Amino acid sequence: MFNHNKIIADQIAWIKSGKIGCVFASALVKMHDKIGWEFEVVDGAVEERSWTHVWNSLPKDVFLVSLLFPERDIYYVKQWALRNGFYLETITGTDVHEDGSNDVFEGLRITMPEGVAWVQYFGPDSHVKTRQSPYPMLMFTVKLPAHIYAKTMVKGILHLAHASIQYLSPKKCETLWNQSYAATKKILGHSPVSPREAAKTTYVQYEKDPHHRSSTTS
């Protein structure tokens, strides 16, 4: 039996530590209960909860959700998502290799009442260093709060940068925005194209699924 409170506490501690790269997230998770950021253990290897069950049980003032899957992996979590109404979008990377090819990624999405949510995977097996959290996790915005940072506005899209900034001053937001870029560059060892590009949501770089359970469209 999993200790849900400890799992959530460990994940929050990782975000607070700054290893996530996004200084906004590290600051906002300290007040997650005030800004409508909900953490839920969805699958504990014994009983799996559906997204419909989780969605219907969320408080009305929740804007951002983190769904945790202890003792699972990136492939299991993807299959859970596809069984629960999420879908994949193919994303071609901007870097061109010597043979003229580009990296190809999967973007996990879900349609919410206020737009399409870009769903981010975090976990020990993530292909991105700033997303290697202690436990596998899907994180995404389910609806827009009243107060969001102007630089994150993308019409019709719900992404992680849409967390509520109700308790942050404009000056603090600007500082966090710039610090996020610097922190991500330090952790990755190279410069992201821009803070906006760094916030883009990809699920995983294409590679062979050892479980042989799906293609990118099933």
Image (cartoon, rainbow, N blue to C red):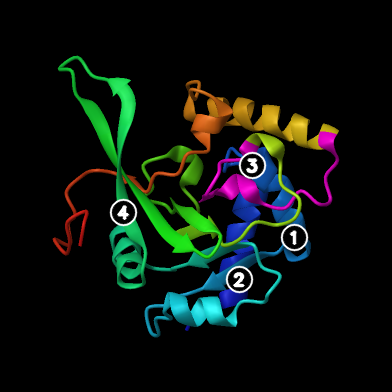
Is the residue 136 above or below the residue 71 in the image?
above
Mark 3: secondary structure: loop
- Label 3 packing within 10 angstroms: few (<14), some (14-19), many (20+): some
Please identify the quarter of the rendering in which residue 173 is found.
top right
Nearest to N terminus: mark 3 or mark 1:
3
Magenta stretch bounds = 152-170
Residue at numbered disc 4? 88
Mark toward the viewer: 2 or 4: 4
Residue 109 to residue 47: above or below:
above
Residue 6: image tag: 2
Read off the residue under disc 1: 35
| Nearer mark to the viewer, of 1 and 4 | 4
Q: Earlier in the sequence, mark 4 or mark 3?
A: 3
Question: Which numbered disc, 4 or 3, marks the residue closer to the eye?
Answer: 4
Q: Is residue 165 magenta?
A: yes
Location of residue 70 in the rendering, given as x and y in whole percent from the top left corner? 44, 68
Circle 2 — which element?
helix
Label 3 belongs to which residue? 18
Residue at x-position 61% and y-position 77%: 58
Q: Is residue 32 above or below residue 194?
A: below
Give the total of numbered labels: 4
Q: Which element type, helix, strand or loop, lies under badge 1?
A: helix
Q: Is residue 2 visible?
A: no
Q: Which residue is at a point 74% across and 60% down the rendered structure image?
A: 35
Figure quadrant of the C terminus: bottom left
Packing grade of label 2 (10 A; few <14, some 14-19, many >=20) is few
N-term mark: 1 or 4? 1
In three-dimensional space, the C-alpha distance between marks 1 and 2, rounded to whole angstroms, equals 21 Å
Which callout, 2 or 4, points at the residue further toward the start of the chain? 2
- Looking at the image, is mark 1 or mark 2 nearer the viewer? 1
**Amino acid under disc 2:** Lys
